[in-house]
């Protein structure tokens, strides 16, 4: 692994950008490359933690089971994003499962290795607190969507949010994953998607959905 190139990539991540070049290089030397195939489970909820992952390519979903055992998708993370970051805050087991939804490459870093550098950098510690706040806000916003939006609104907002985050009109998400994200049965989500396609708001592909009319999708989001 070219540690200098890894250190340069770390500079693009908000979590690592505040570190000095020397500290980023030290962290790069501790990171290990990992590759996950599409649909591979990276870790399960309640697994032992201890590592944080920085995605270099691909997309993963973060999910938890609901009361009936069905999967609820709570976040998608892609290139440049970090996942498993709660392992940096305590020694508890994983709070969610993470699965690759495309072929995914990542850099893995052990908690002890990161904390050794973090403790020397108060600014980086503040960044970590900001990251924790982001996690809380994201979870709160997801709950608000589930409570205040009807199913067509949740589907439309989910598609738009993922599209905006990825910077493309193609949403790489299966209908099953979308159902988990919006907290509904797949058959119900399929009906909503079919209606959106009939209205020329989207075009459904294999393992992806293309956004055709953003304004039409936005019109379905009514709180």
Image (cartoon, helix red, strand yellow):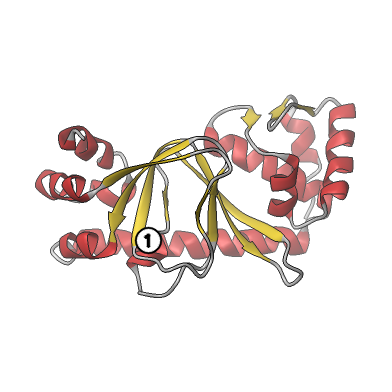
Q: Residue at x 54, y 65 (%)?
A: 45
The picture places residue 186, in percent across and down from the top left corner, at: 82, 49
The picture places residue 52, in percent across and down from the top left corner, at: 36, 56
Q: Nearer the viewer, residue 163 or 86?
A: 86
Q: Mark 1 Cα within 10 Å, few/some/many (few <14, many 20+)? A: some
Looking at the image, residue 170 sits to the left or right of residue 91; the answer is right
Q: Residue at x 51, y 40 (%)?
A: 59
Q: Compared to 180, does 199 lie above or below?
A: above
Screen quadrant of the C terminus: bottom right
Q: Nearer the viewer, residue 86 or 207?
A: 207
Q: Quadrant of residue 159?
A: top right
Looking at the image, residue 203 sits to the left or right of residue 138; the answer is right
Q: Quadrant of residue 10?
A: top left
Q: Residue at x 83, y 46 (%)?
A: 189
Looking at the image, residue 127 sits to the left or right of residue 197; the answer is left
The picture places residue 42, in percent across and down from the top left corner, at: 48, 52
Q: Compared to 119, does 22 lie above or below?
A: above
Q: Compared to 62, does 60 lie above or below?
A: above
Looking at the image, residue 126 sits to the left or right of residue 38; the answer is left
Residue designated by label 1? 130
Screen quadrant of the N terminus: top left
Q: Residue at x 16, y 64 (%)?
A: 116
Q: Quadrant of residue 6?
A: top left
The number of numbered badges drawn on the structure is 1
Q: Secondary structure at mark 1?
A: helix
Q: Nearer the viewer, residue 167 or 186?
A: 186
């Amino acid at each position: 692994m070219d540690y200098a190139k890894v250190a340069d990539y770390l500079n693009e991540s908000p979590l690592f950008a505040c570190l000095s070049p020397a500290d980023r290089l030290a962290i790069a030397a501790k990171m290990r490359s990992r590759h996950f195939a599409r649909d591979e489970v990276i870790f399960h909820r309640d697994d032992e933690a201890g590592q944080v992952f920085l995605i270099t390519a691909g997309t993963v979903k973060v999910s938890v089971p609901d009361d009936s055992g069905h999967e609820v998708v709570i976040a998608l993370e892609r290139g440049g994003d970090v996942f498993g970051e709660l392992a940096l805050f305590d020694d508890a087991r994983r709070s969610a499962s993470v699965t690759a939804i495309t072929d995914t490459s990542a850099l893995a870093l052990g908690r002890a290795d990161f904390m050794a550098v973090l403790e020397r950098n108060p600014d980086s510690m503040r960044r970590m607190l900001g990251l924790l706040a982001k996690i809380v806000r994201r979870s709160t916003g997801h709950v608000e969507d589930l409570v205040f939006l009807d199913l067509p609104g949740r589907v439309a907002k989910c598609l738009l949010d993922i599209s905006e985050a990825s910077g493309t009109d193609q949403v790489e998400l299966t209908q099953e994953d979308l159902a988990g994200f919006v907290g509904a049965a797949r058959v119900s989500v399929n009906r909503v998607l079919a209606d959106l396609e009939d209205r020329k708001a989207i075009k459904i592909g294999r393992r992806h959905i293309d956004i055709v009319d953003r304004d039409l999708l936005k019109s379905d989001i009514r709180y």
